[in-house]
């Protein structure tokens, strides 16, 4: 992938990702010709990731023309923000259903009691339940078919804190040194839930669910089929190891990639307000929920959309 400015990552013996100066990636692949959006307004938040969409109510019936523009915007910006969306749970679900089958998360009932719907997860945090999502991750990569996207709606937010951040893993891949790309392009990694969700679940529940959700393998570099864009598809929450290399090399490469994804140049940060909705492409970005608001209350409703099997570089 080409970049707007030659990468200024200058490997040194003790740090293969030493960098200074501009780190600027393309927002779209070179093959995509930018077109204006005619069905809503788009305000970019950073150069490559995150855009605020206005002039659209998610709870209404959206035409094919509007949906096509939203698909294009999601591919371009990876995460879309919608303010002042006074929609209820049924409208939230109806919007998500236009993108595909809805996901039923098998583990949240163990961590967030009182869930009333299989396809809408209420994430309620307060003085009794602190936020634990403050780690960079793609959702559900332990599944054979990881989530395509997620729609998160703010129900109740603290006065300050509780922001969510997203990292552009397409830009992160583009700005890797070629030598590192050559090493990781053909590799696959193992993803599992045992060392995350499994650590806090009753042993009998882990044993019952394990046959349904065994460890899976996905390419480290995933290709987005609609655009051909290459993205990094490993995360510190669910990725266990790289297959076919030594433990030492696996740890070295994963640590390097996680650090690279964490660069501020690849990030966008959302300050939530009531009735704000975030919609992101789970294939092309990671997210991190800042847990700095305890013991204040923060309530979010999330719906995830079923994805397909990740495909690597052919």
Image (cartoon, helix red, strand yellow):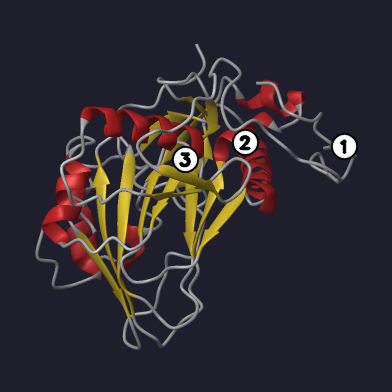
Q: Residue at x 15, y 54 (%)?
A: 91
Q: Secondary structure at mark 2?
A: helix
Of label 1 and label 2, which has the lower sequence position? 1
Q: Residues within 10 Å of mark 2 (few under 14, many from 20)?
A: many
Q: Residues within 10 Å of mark 3 (few under 14, many from 20)?
A: many
Q: Nearer the viewer, residue 291 or 235?
A: 291
Q: Residue at x 64, y 30 (%)?
A: 26
Q: Quick check: can you spot residue 211?
A: no
Q: Residue at x 50, y 77 (%)?
A: 161
Q: Which residue is mark 3?
A: 78
Number of marks in the rendered image:
3
Q: Quadrant of residue 8?
A: top right
Question: Quadrant of the image for the N terminus?
Answer: top right
Q: Which residue is mark 2?
A: 171
Mark closer to the observer (1, 2)? 2
Q: Residue at x 57, y 19 (%)?
A: 186
Q: Residues within 10 Å of mark 1 (few under 14, many from 20)?
A: few
Relative image position of residue 58 (x, y in whole percent): 24, 50
Relative image position of residue 81 (x, y in whole percent): 41, 53
Of label 1 and label 3, which has the lower sequence position? 1
Label 2, label 3: how far apart the Cα atoms are: 11 Å
Relative image position of residue 170 (x, y in whole percent): 57, 34
Q: Quick check: can you spot residue 179?
A: yes
Q: Which residue is mark 1?
A: 10
Label 1, label 2: how far apart the Cα atoms are: 17 Å
Q: Nearer the viewer, residue 229 or 137?
A: 229
In the picture provided, is 139 more to the left or to the right than 65?
A: right
Relative image position of residue 205 (x, y in whole percent): 18, 59
Q: Nearer the viewer, residue 237 or 308?
A: 308
């Amino acid at each position: 992938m080409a970049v707007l400015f030659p990468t200024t990552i200058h490997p040194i013996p003790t740090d293969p990702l030493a960098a200074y100066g501009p780190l600027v990636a393309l927002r779209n692949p070179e093959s995509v010709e930018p077109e204006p959006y005619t069905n809503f307004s788009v305000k970019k938040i950073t150069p490559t990731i995150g855009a605020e969409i206005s002039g659209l109510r998610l709870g209404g019936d959206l035409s094919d023309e509007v949906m096509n523009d939203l698909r294009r915007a999601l591919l371009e910006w990876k995460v879309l923000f919608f303010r002042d969306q006074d929609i209820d749970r049924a409208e939230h679900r109806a919007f998500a259903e236009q993108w595909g089958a809805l996901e039923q998360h098998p583990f949240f009932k163990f961590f967030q009691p009182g869930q009333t719907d299989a396809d809408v997860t209420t994430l309620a945090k307060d003085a009794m339940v602190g936020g634990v999502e403050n780690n960079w991750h793609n959702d559900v990569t332990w599944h054979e078919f990881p989530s395509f996207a997620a729609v998160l709606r703010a129900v109740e937010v603290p006065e300050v804190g509780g922001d969510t951040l997203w990292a552009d893993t397409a830009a992160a891949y583009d700005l890797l040194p070629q030598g590192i790309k050559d090493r990781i392009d053909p590799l696959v990694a193992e993803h599992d839930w045992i060392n995350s969700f499994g650590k806090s679940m009753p042993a009998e529940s882990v044993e019952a669910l394990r046959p349904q959700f065994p460890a899976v393998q996905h390419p480290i570099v995933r290709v987005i089929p609609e655009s051909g864009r290459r993205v990094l598809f490993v995360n510190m929450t669910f990725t266990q190891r790289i297959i076919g290399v030594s433990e030492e090399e696996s740890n070295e490469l994963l640590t390097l990639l996680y650090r690279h994804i964490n660069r501020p140049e690849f990030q966008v940060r959302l300050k939530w307000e009531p009735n704000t909705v975030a919609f992101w492409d789970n294939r092309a970005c990671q997210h991190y929920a800042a847990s700095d608001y305890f013991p204040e209350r923060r309530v979010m409703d999330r719906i995830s959309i079923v994805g397909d099997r990740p495909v690597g570089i052919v």
